[in-house]
Amino acid sequence: MINYSRAIKIVLFIWILGYSLALPLGIFSEAVKYENYCGEFCEENWPDYSNDTGYSRLRRMYGFAVLILQFAFPVIISSMCYIAISRVMNEQIIRRRGQQLLPSAERRLRDKKNRANRMMVYMVGGLLIAWMPLNLVNLYRDFFDITSFGPWYSTVFAFSHVIAMMSGVVNPVIYSWFNPSFRSAIQNLIRRCVGGPLEMRRDSEVRPLKHQIIIVALDKNGVTNEESL
C-alpha cells in the first residue's frame, strides 16, 4: 500500500530520474548561428560527431533510449495497468453473480465495465497518437539525414510537437466523457461560472415581499375587529 511518505519518495525519484535523463542534452548542446537566419539556435554537439558521415553514435544511442523510456515504457505500463483493472472488474461481476443480483443491477455493472474499458482504450490510443509523431521525427533525425525533409522539417517538427503537448488536454476530456460523476461536476462548475452573474442579477430583480401585520382585537361588545398594517 502506498502511503503519503512513500508517494513523496516515488515523486522525488521520478523527478531525479527525469532530470538525469535530460542532463546529456544540457551538456552536449551549444548555441549555433546560421547564415541568412536571425538569432542563435540550440543544437546538439556530441563529442563523437563525425563531419564525414554527419552522424553520432552517442546521439543515436541516446535518442533510442529516450524513445524507449519516454514512449515505449509508458505505453506498456499503462496497458498492463488497464488490463489489470479490467480483470478486477470482471472478477467483481462474477463474484456478484453468486449473490443473485437483479437484472437491472447486473446491467449497470456491465455498462460500467464497458465504459471503463472504452475509456482505457482511448487513453492508450490517445497516448500513442499524441507522442508517436514526435518520437518518430526525433528518431529519424538521429539516424538519417534531415535534409530529405527539405524546407518542411521545421513545420513537421513543430506540428508533431504541438500534437504531443495536446495529450495534456486530451486526457481530461476523455475522463470527463466516460466518467458521469466527473462530467456532472464539470457541467455544474461551468453552469455556476457562466450562470453566476445572471443568477445574481435575477435575485436583485426580485421584488421584496410585502409584509402584512394583522391586529385582531375584541371590543366591549365581543365583536372581532381586524386591522392590517
Image (cartoon, rainbow, N blue to C red):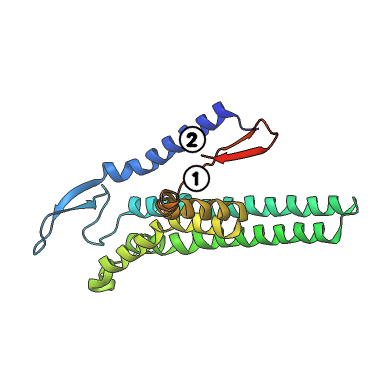
How far across and down, in percent of the image, does residue 174 sit?
Answer: 54, 59
Disc on res. 210: 1
Question: Which secondary structure, mark 2?
Answer: helix
Q: Nearer the viewer, residue 125 or 72?
A: 125
Task: Give, as a three-letter code, the residue at label 1.
Answer: Lys
Residue at image point 34% right, 50% down? 58
Closest to the camera, between mark 2 and mark 1, is 1
- Mark 2: few, some, or many residues within 10 Å (few <14, many ≥20)? few
93 and 53: which one is in front? 93
Mark 2 and mark 1: span between their CA atoms? 62 Å
Looking at the image, is mark 2 or mark 1 earlier in the sequence? 2
Question: Could you tell me if residue 203 is visible in this image?
Answer: yes
Residue drawn at 52 percent across, 52 percent down:
188
Residue 219, x across and y down, in percent = 64, 32
45 left or right, relative to 63: left
Residue 39: image tag? none
Residue at 67% in and 38% down: 224
Q: Is residue 68 visible?
A: no
Q: Position of residue 4 (x, y in %)?
A: 56, 28
**Residue ID at (79%, 50%):** 92
225 lies above or below 63 = above
What percent of the width, then of the height, locates residue 168? 44, 54
Image height of 55 relative to 204, above or below: below
In front: 60, or 103? 103
**Res. 178 image quadrant:** bottom right
User: Label 2 amino acid?
Assistant: Val
Mark 1 Cα within 10 Å, few/some/many (few <14, many 20+)?
A: few
Q: Which mark is residue 11?
A: 2
